[in-house]
Amino acid sequence: MALTRKTRATAPETQSLGDLLSALTQEFSRAALAADITRKQTQKIYDNNELLQGDEASKVRVVSARIEIPLAIAEIREGKAAEPGLSKAQVADMLHPSINFEIRERIAARVIEGLSSRGKNSIKNKTLLKDIQLEIEQEKIEGFKMREHFITKRFEVIKRTEEKNPPVIKESRFIYKAEDLRELGPEKLIKIHVDLDIS
């Protein structure tokens, strides 16, 4: 009699890595909350017991954890195009090369921080160039006005490049359930080591 392999009725369930890690961290947060509630309840028992009054209920808190997660990659697909925005390196490149490199890097970091905090760091922002110039002006760079045309030219090049080739986000989906992973076999699994700072 020929043996036939049992086939799955449905495809294995998948999740993104972000969702899996989010679920894990939420579990630790809930566990910490439950532990705190239990300790408070236990402390009431101590306070109301003549033999235990004055003592504190023992407290155990997990402040960090290292987890090994076995997964299998189900698929890697192209997601939606990310909304183009400028990076620190691009802003630094817009500053004239006569400005010291470290100063350009420092200014670029502050410019990106300022734009991002105000929701202005987007190529679709029609006033982006003006916003960048205002941010840079606040740095009071000597001779900035003489180099302003350089920023405009570099910005136009970057803008055309970003609009022509918008960055694309890759989306990965992972098989994570133990029963599905057992069917795949160990040779198809990957292991992700995660260090969690719970404190």
Image (tube, grey):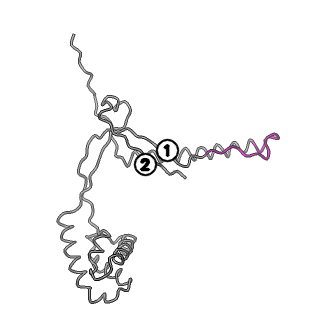
The reply, left or right, for residue 186 in relation to residue 53 is left
Viewport quadrant of the N terminus: top left
Identity, as a three-letter code, of the amino acid under mark 1: Glu
- Return the residue at label 1: 27
Q: Which residues are magenta?
A: 46-60
Front position in the image: 54 or 143: 143
Q: Are marks 1 and 2 in contact (CB under 8 Å)?
A: no
**Does 8 sit above or below residue 168?**
above
Residue 28 on image: x %, y %: 51, 45
The reply, left or right, for residue 164 in relation to residue 181 is left
Packing grade of label 1 (10 A; few <14, some 14-19, many >=20) is few
**Does 49 sit above or below residue 110?**
above
**Does 177 sit above or below residue 55?**
above
- Return the residue at label 2: 22
Identity, as a three-letter code, of the amino acid under mark 2: Ser
Residue 42 on image: x %, y %: 69, 42
Residue at 55% x, 53% y is 199
Packing grade of label 2 (10 A; few <14, some 14-19, many >=20) is few
